[in-house]
Structure formats: C-alpha cells, structure tokens
Amino acid sequence: MNANTNETRLLIEIIRRNVELEARLIDDLLDLSRIGNGKLQLNLQEAD
Amino acid sequence: MVPMDIPAGVAFLCDAQGRIMTIIRDELGMGNGFAPERFFPATVDPVSTAKTLSFLEEIRTHGAAFNWTLNCAVGGEIISLHFAGATDSNGAVVVVGARSHAEIMQLYDDLMQINNEQVNALRTAMKEVASGRNRLNTDAHLYDELSRLNNELTTTQRELARKNAELKRLNEQKNQFLGIAAHDLRTPLGAIMIYSEFLMESLPDRFQGEEENFLKTIHSSSHYMLSLVNDLLDIVKIEAGTLDLDLEPHDLARILQRTVLLNRVFAEKKEIGLLFDDSETSLPVMMIDAPKIEQVFNNLIGNAIKFSHPGTTIRIEMMMRKETVEITVVDQGIGIPAGELEGLFLPFRTTSTRSTAGEKGAGLGLAIARKIVQRHGGRITVESTPGTGSTFTVVLPIGTWAEKR
C-alpha cells in the first residue's frame, strides 16, 4: 500500500513536470509570436 | 516662283525604302548629297540615320508619320528639322520637312495646290489627326510615358521576383519552425498521456470520484492536444511535400469497419446513430496507406458527429464503380453554407457553423484528409444543404493492386 502511494506520487510528479514543460513551451511560442507582431509588453518593476 | 510668305521647307517623293524620286521643293538647301536617286536616310546627319529608317518604317506600317525630328545638313551646318510623311496606295511616299512643326503645317497648306495622289494621301492622313495639334505633341509624350511605364514595369517585375523568392524562403523557414515546435510540444504531451493512462488503468482503486474525473480530464485533454499537434505536423509535411505514403495491400471495408467502431463510442454519447452499409462485397484488395486512410475517415465521421444533433443518423456507404470505389459519409447535421464550401479543404479554414456540443477543431483535418486522398490518386468532394446535412464523398482508384497482381 505504501509502495503504491509512493509510485502514484512519483507518476503524478512526472505528469506535473511535463505539464510545466508543455506550458513553458507554449508560453515561449506565445512570446515569440508577440515579438513577431511587435506586441511584447514589458512589465517593468523596481528590482535590485 | 515661290511666294515669300511660304516658309522655307523641303518636300519630296521617295519610294518605300527611302530612295528619293522627285524633289518637289527645297528652299532650305538640303546638303549632304540630297538629290533624286539618293537614299534619303543616307543624306541626313549620320546620328539620325537609324531614326530616319524608323520614320520610314512607321510610314510603311501606319501609312503616315508626324512630327519626327531628324538632324540634317543644311547650308553647311547640322540643324534639327521636323518631318512628316505619308504613303499612297502605290507605296510611294511624300515627305515634307521644315524648321518647326507649325511650318510643316503651312507647307502642307501650300502643297495643297499641288494635286497628286501622294499629297492627297498626306492631306487625308493629316486631317485624321487634325482634331488636335496637341495629339502630334502628345504622341511624343505618349511615347515617353510608355517607355517610362515600361521601365517601371520591368523594375516592378524584378522586385516581385525577388520578393517571391524571399517569401518562399520565409515560408520554408516557417514550416521548419512549425515542425520543430510541434515536435517539442509532442514530447511532454506523450508523457502526460502515457502516465495518466497508466495511473487510471493500473491503480484503479487509488482514484475514485472526483480524483478519477481529474485523471480522465488530464488524459482526454492531452489526447486532444496531441491530435492537434499531430495535425500541425501533417500540415508541415504536406506543405514541404514530404507526406509520404506507406502503401500496402489492405481491405478497405475492414478499415472502414474499424473506424466506424471507434467512432460509435462518441456517436452514442450524443445519441447519434452510426450506420455502416458493408453489403458491398466485391471490393478487391487495394494498395493503400491504412493508418492515413483511417485518419481520413476518422476525420469525416468525427466531423459528422460534431455537427449532428442527437436523434439523427450518420450513414457510411461504400459503392464499387468501374475503376474506383466511392465512399460517402452522409449526415443529417446542420450543414455548411454554400459560400463556405469552396475553402473548406484549405488549412486553418473553419466554418461559421458551430458544433452541436461545443467540440473544437483547428481547421486542419479536412485539409489533411484531402491531401491524403489526393496522394492515393483519389479525390474528395462535399455537398451540403444548411439545415439538412452534408455528404462527403471520397473516390479512390482500385486499379493499383489488381494490376500488380
């Protein structure tokens, strides 16, 4: 039972990582298309 | 002999080639051997010889020529003279020249008194353009304008060819990029799909109720997204011309049966009937790319389900023709407006119609389907009546395999 829970957690972790990767790829694509359209907006904030 | 108010000018008759026959008058004192039997183009200044030949050519082709400027030797110096000329029915040419175009007109008035066929011809020809002295000047302007436009056209053509090459290069780059992006997008999707599937199947007792639904949504969403990305890759292959077929002998009826079976699940969810008439048994084995043909009918049947209301029926029929097999997918769905039928098979083209249960699409399926059918040597057509339904017809040649056997 414990092994099952660990395995489940591991599998869900893999799914989560891949979802994040996919989302980042899509964000990059959207950024690229915004750059192509000249609509990339910067959100400038004070930072050290 | 010549009245004093008549402007100084030259008038002569020559043959079509420019050989001087009779000099009617010459108050200017044309030099450079200007005399009967001489060749007129040889008596003008050498810089104007070619132009004089063009002048004579224009008289030959158009019957008359006006307001040509030719450099001539007059009284020991080279001056520009204005010339006009016309031909008669015998091919003889009368030419008049003077220091200005106005003087030619006066000269012409004077020549009116000489009544012979050549002068009459010149008179008639001049009358035709008498509607405007302007036109005589306009001719030169028109010529300038035409050559300017011609130059512009040549430049534009060159520019166009350059732009075209540039566009072709950019399009190739776009396809390349699309291909790379789609490949990258596919990798995580594959992992999400496989692991969510594994979780659902191997550990069913772990997930119940809400959790099970979450997992199902993850799985179906990634599945849908993967199919979008795969369509994108197909379009890239089609545009790059690298959509290759893997032809093998197959029983088309079996492929259709399988496709219908797969789609029945989705049809039943919407309470739509899916009928496959497989009574046609004379179908020979055909050389086809089975997964791609399956993709075509998956798309057609899938579309039919998307755009049909519950309680209706979708019929799939297969008919043998002489050298082809004809498969129709007939639905009783919402139909497609006539104006949107033409672009239906173009990539990224979606219609104004709404699917009946909010199903989505990127507008790539039919473009891919058409290309696959075309690569098999077949064709795909559509007929539709809004409110009544659509019929998609796929015609595939059956010859290939039978001939090889």
Image: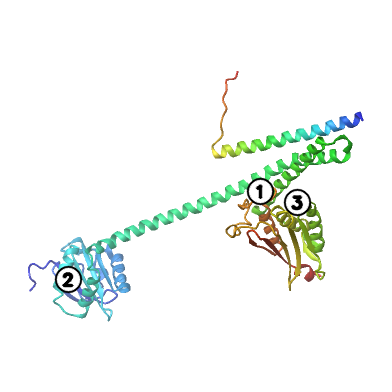
Q: Judge whether B378 appears above or below B18 on screen.
A: above
Count residues near mark 3 (Cα–Cα under 10 Å), then give few for <14, some for 14-19, many for 20+.
some
Picture coordinates of residue B388, whole percent (x, y): 66, 61
State left or right for residue B64 relative to residue B172: left
- The local secondary structure at tag 1 comes to loop
Closer to the camera: disc 3 or disc 2? 3
Residue at 8% from the left image edge and 67% from the top image edge: B5
Q: Earlier in the sequence, mark 2 or mark 1?
A: 2
- The local secondary structure at tag 2 comes to helix
- The residue beneath circle 3 is B270
Residue B292, by quadrant, is bottom right
Q: Are marks 3 and 2 in contact (CB under 8 Å)?
A: no
In this view, the residue in front, B139 or B114, is B139
- The residue beneath circle 1 is B362
Residue at 62% from the left image edge and 50% from the top image edge: B348
State left or right for residue B45 relative to residue B260: left
Q: Are marks 3 and 1 in contact (CB under 8 Å)?
A: no
Picture coordinates of residue B248, whole percent (x, y): 80, 61
Three-letter amino acid code of the residue under disc 1: Ala
The quarter in which the C terminus of chain B is drawn is: bottom right
Disc 1 sits on a residue from what chain?
A: B
Count residues near mark 2 (Cα–Cα under 10 Å), then give few for <14, some for 14-19, many for 20+.
many
- The residue beneath circle 2 is B108
In the orientation shown, which residue stands out farthest toward the right?
A1
In this view, the residue in front, A39 or B32, is A39
Give the Cα distance between marks 3 and 1. Answer: 21 Å
